[in-house]
Image: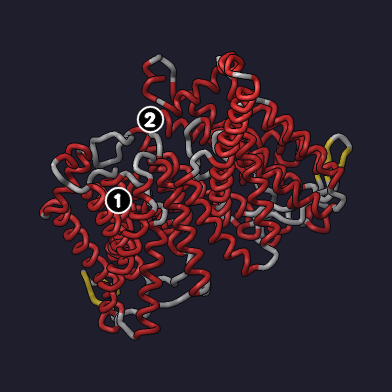
């Protein structure tokens, strides 16, 4: 029984990291139709900013979360403004452009900071563990889980309860009609992309104490995050949440029985087979186009 | 698109050994030509079929491993364990040859497998993707993810695949009594022949009825479906054909490089292929081929120092973004525009020289 709960908690922990990374990706794809292959690099930039602030300015991880969000969001805004907004009606080309941007970011970091591994310290207040249902769980993982829930709630509120969210939903439904009502689509797209990038940066900063920081760390995360988006379907935030936790539990369980690689291979196989029968994803009704 | 540029390129490729006297250089050029074949295969599925396969290196890697497995089993016993067991299996305490290695004792099986297995894998994956009418960016993500996973599996299953180190210490390929030394002319001509074959097969396909339908699907999938064509079948076919050519390129790469490695089906290579294809011109077979040879060749020439290689990757990233933004048809598109401009100018100047009447005749 203990082992069962331990598995559930491991799965929740993997799921919350997946959701953290996939949230930004899902928003950018769902609202702008852009598959952002530079997303992993935004995660990487967030982790490096955390490292930079900690090692050069002595700022703790918790204190640096907001500056990290702002910094990566700003980079995202610049990229949207000067690259992606030029590719309005060429969705396949945005994949290529973001991929190119990804290489530039990754290589830029490698050239300026170097490719050796960097480490970020856990916040001292969260470095112990706590007891949940009779099991000892690292406090930081619990904190990650809570932060993920808060970020999801904030995102949902932004989308559904603010003016900018309403404008974005209007543009998603019909861009030209929205424009004729005086909504500046370019500005909204810029802000959306910046927000998605900022979320990725936060994800990178938050996972940085658990794993080492390197220029190519983003690649692994982005593939996992894409699986979440493909499984969940892209139009609903709830689908992203559900699929992140399903995948988290599934990878946790298979990894326990076999190993990480087998888990990844089986999960991918399951997703490819699933697409054949539910092309629209598990939790949405709209067909992908 | 016409056949003349293809024939010119093939003639130049076959003439190269007359100019290049250095075996080392010849091997390098052969390597770029093989990457050119891989890029042709991507142009076929992406430029003509509208299927952006971000995992094109997967087929390449499968072909490369098929050839490497066969050549590994041919190595002299010094490099293998007792009973011809590959050395890395001995190190990993594998007692006997796994069943899926057995058939690779035959070279002809390996050559067939290097082409057929990638095609079958692609057809299977394509069946799931295209029958569900998944299009556009989703295809790219799924192909990318599949390749990454296969790459991880190969690295993970070290005792059967050589893991991170790949398969090294290979014998030379021998066919019809000819030994294909990586640094010899025979290998170069083998590669050149395959370049020609790939270009001609791809060209023949694009001119065929099926090829025209595939291009129509790229331009407007729905309309082709309303005409009553089974869209998915054509997409699966071009996807598999492209994978088969990539598999062929992978086999040649093993012969030229003398090893197989998980990096052959890595994200890095897959990305490079897309870049070459975009720079050369995705809708032109010759353009994409030359794009690969030129960009890869330039990279090879400039990357003597490691520091420069890093900068080069950065430059390539920037170049790629610029090409995507401002030159969607690549250098081939640019060449086409230039050609039309020259022809047009000549017509105009001729018109001026021969009077107005002639101009009307010429333009009619």
Label 1 secondary element: helix
For the point 43% across and 77% down, the residue is A119
For the point 52% across and 34% down, the residue is B47
Residue B97 position (above or below residue A220): above
Lateral position of residue A10 relative to residue B98, left or right: left
Same chain check for tags 1 and 2: no
Residue B214 position (above or below residue B38): above
For the point 26% across and 46% down, the residue is A31
Q: Residues within 10 Å of mark 2 (few under 14, many from 20)?
A: some
Label 2 secondary element: loop
Residue A166 position (above or below residue A198): above
Q: Residues within 10 Å of mark 1 (few under 14, many from 20)?
A: many
Cβ atoms under marks 1 and 2 closer than 8 Å? no
Q: Which mark is residue A28?
A: 1
Looking at the rendered structure, the number of numbered marks drawn on it comes to: 2
Q: Position of residue B319 (x, y in %)?
A: 53, 53
Q: Chain of mark 2?
A: B
Q: Quadrant of the N terminus of chain B?
A: top right
Pointer 2: what residue? B133
3D distance between C-alphas at marks 1 and 2:
23 Å
Q: Position of residue A89 (x, y in %)?
A: 35, 39
The answer to whether residue B57 is visible is no
Lateral position of residue A99 relative to residue A229, left or right: right
Q: Chain of mark 1?
A: A
Q: Position of residue A238 (x, y in %)?
A: 21, 49
Q: Between tags 1 and 2, which lies in front?
A: 1
Lateral position of residue A259 relative to residue B179, left or right: left
Nearest to the observer: residue B111 or residue A152: A152
């Amino acid at each position: 029984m203990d082992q069962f709960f331990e598995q559930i908690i491991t799965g929740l922990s993997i799921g919350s990291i997946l959701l953290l990374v996939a949230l930004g990706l899902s928003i950018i794809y769902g609202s702008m139709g852009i598959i952002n292959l530079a997303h992993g690099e935004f995660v990487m930039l967030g982790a490096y900013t955390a490292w930079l602030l900690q090692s050069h300015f002595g700022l703790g991880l918790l204190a640096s979360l907001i500056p990290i969000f702002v910094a990566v969001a700003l980079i995202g805004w610049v990229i949207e403004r000067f690259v992606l907004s030029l590719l309005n009606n060429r969705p396949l080309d945005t994949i290529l452009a973001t991929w190119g941007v990804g290489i530039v970011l990754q290589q830029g970091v490698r050239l300026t900071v170097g490719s050796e591994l960097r480490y970020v310290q856990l916040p001292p207040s969260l470095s112990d563990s706590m007891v949940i249902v009779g099991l000892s769980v690292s406090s930081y993982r619990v904190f990650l889980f809570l932060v993920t829930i808060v970020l999801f709630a904030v995102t949902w509120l932004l989308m559904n309860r603010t003016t900018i969210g309403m404008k974005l939903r209007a543009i998603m439904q019909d861009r030209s009609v929205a424009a004729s009502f005086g909504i500046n689509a370019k500005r909204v797209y810029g802000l959306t992309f910046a927000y998605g990038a900022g979320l990725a940066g936060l994800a990178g900063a938050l996972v940085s104490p658990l794993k080492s920081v390197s220029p190519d760390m983003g690649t692994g995360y982005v593939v996992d995050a894409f699986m979440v988006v493909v499984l969940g379907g892209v139009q609903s935030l709830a689908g992203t949440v559900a699929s992140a936790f399903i995948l988290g539990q599934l990878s946790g369980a298979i990894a326990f029985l076999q190993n990480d690689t087998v888990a990844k291979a089986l999960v991918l196989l399951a997703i490819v087979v699933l697409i054949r029968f539910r092309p629209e994803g598990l939790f949405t009704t709209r067909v992908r186009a | 698109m016409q056949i003349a540029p293809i024939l010119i390129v093939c003639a130049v490729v076959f003439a190269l050994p007359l100019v290049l006297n250095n075996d080392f250089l010849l091997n390098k050029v052969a390597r770029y030509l093989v990457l050119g074949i891989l890029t042709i295969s991507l142009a076929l599925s992406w430029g003509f079929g509208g299927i952006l396969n971000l995992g094109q290196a997967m087929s390449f890697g499968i072909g490369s491993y098929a050839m490497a497995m066969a050549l590994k089993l041919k190595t002299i016993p010094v490099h293998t364990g007792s009973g011809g067991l590959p050395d890395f299996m001995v190190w990993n305490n594998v007692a006997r040859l796994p069943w899926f290695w057995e058939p690779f004792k035959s070279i002809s099986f390996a050559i067939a497998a290097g082409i057929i297995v990638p095609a079958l894998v692609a057809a299977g994956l394509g069946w799931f993707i295209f029958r569900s009418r998944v299009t556009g960016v989703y295809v790219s993500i799924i192909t990318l993810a599949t390749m990454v996973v296969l790459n991880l599996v190969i690295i993970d299953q070290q005792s059967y695949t050589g893991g991170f180190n790949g398969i090294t210490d290979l014998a030379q390929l021998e066919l019809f009594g000819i030994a294909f030394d990586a640094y010899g002319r025979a290998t170069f001509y083998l590669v050149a022949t395959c370049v020609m074959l790939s270009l001609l097969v791809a060209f023949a396909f694009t001119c065929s009825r099926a090829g025209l339908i595939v291009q129509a699907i790229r331009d407007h999938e729905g309309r082709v479906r309303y005409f009553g064509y089974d869209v998915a079948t054509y997409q699966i076919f071009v996807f598999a054909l492209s994978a088969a050519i990539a598999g062929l390129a992978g086999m040649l790469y093993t012969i030229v490089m003398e090893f197989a490695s998980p990096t052959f089906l890595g994200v890095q290579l897959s990305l490079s292929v897309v870049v070459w294809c975009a720079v050369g011109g995705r809708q032109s077979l010759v353009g994409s081929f030359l794009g690969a040879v030129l960009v890869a060749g330039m990279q090879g020439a400039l990357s003597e120092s490691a520091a420069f290689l890093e900068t080069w990757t950065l430059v390539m990233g920037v170049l790629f973004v610029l090409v995507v933004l401002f030159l969607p048809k690549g250098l081939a598109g640019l060449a086409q525009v230039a050609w039309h401009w020259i022809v047009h100018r000549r017509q105009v100047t001729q018109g001026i020289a021969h009077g107005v009447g002639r101009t009307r005749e010429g333009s009619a």
